[in-house]
Image (cartoon, grey):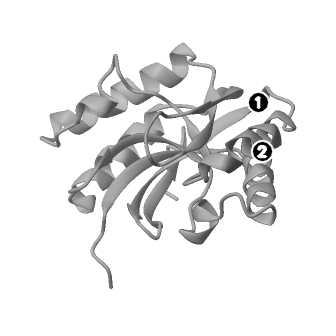
Amino acid sequence: MAMSQGFAIELYLDPALENQVLKAWNVMARRQISTQLIEIESRPHITLFSSPFLEPSKLESIVKTFASKHDPFPLSFSSIGTFCNDNNVLFLAPTPSLSLLQFQSLLCDAIKKEGVEVSDDYAFNSWIPYCSVADQVPKARMPEAFSVLRDLKLPVSGYAIDIGLVEFSPVRELFSFVLGNTVDS
């Protein structure tokens, strides 16, 4: 078993919105632009927090309590982006609504209270919400990858419905909780 590269708390989408993202993943794979996300067995998500070292058991009750106190909220992917680094990630960017920004910020506050360090990338003024659609896209294929995403007819909208902790990679979900679900599942 390979060493874990890290952990992430991920925000998951309702099935219809998730399918819109998966459609893009599948086109990228079919055209052999990028199969990375499918290969690591990821699931469409927005990363709320990530750390190379975590004690999952320490986070489980925090995330469970946090999820129960927050209802599902609307999400709309309205633009396409990429980061200027060597990973050549292509992503859908959600409209930065107050509900999304507050949700992430309050989650990080709850994690910090438990003595877990939150890196600057996830600090309130620097976190960039995004949903990966292609990873390690060859530079020469970037224009084609962009046009695949333009065919999605943005914005695509739906809801954030649950939150989970994963270990990667490959991606292995350790636990997840439905938002606003006060009943023990």
Looking at the picture, does residue 173 appear above or below residue 101?
below
Helix, strand or loop at label 1? It is: strand
Where residue 175 appears, as percent x and y from the top left, is 43, 61
Where residue 64 appears, as percent x and y from the top left, is 39, 48
What residue do we see at 59% from left, 71% from top? 39
- Is 54 positioned to the left or the right of 41 in the image? left
Q: CA distance from mark 2 to mark 1?
A: 24 Å
Residue wearing tag 1: 157
Q: Name the N-terminal-most of marks 2 and 1.
A: 2
Q: Pick the residue in front: 9 or 169.
A: 169
Q: Which mark is residue 77?
A: none
Where residue 117 appears, as percent x and y from the top left, is 16, 40
- Is 55 positioned to the left or the right of 71 in the image? left
Quarter occupied by residue 6: bottom left
What residue do we see at 80% from left, 61% from top? 31
Q: Which mark is residue 144?
A: 2
Looking at the picture, does residue 102 appear above or below residue 92?
above
Mark 1: amino acid: Ser
Where residue 26 appears, as percent x and y from the top left, is 78, 60
Cβ atoms at labels 2 and 1 below 8 Å apart: no
Q: Residues within 10 Å of mark 2 (few under 14, many from 20)?
A: few
What residue do we see at 63% from left, 20% from top? 95
Quarter occupied by residue 172: bottom left
Mark 2: amino acid: Glu
Mark closer to the observer (2, 1): 2
What residue do we see at 62% from left, 27% from top? 94
Looking at the picture, does residue 172 appear above or below residue 44?
below
**Quarter of the image with the N terminus in it:** bottom left
Q: Pick the residue in front: 80 or 137.
A: 137
Q: Pick the residue in front: 59 or 93.
A: 93
Q: Residues within 10 Å of mark 1 (few under 14, many from 20)?
A: some
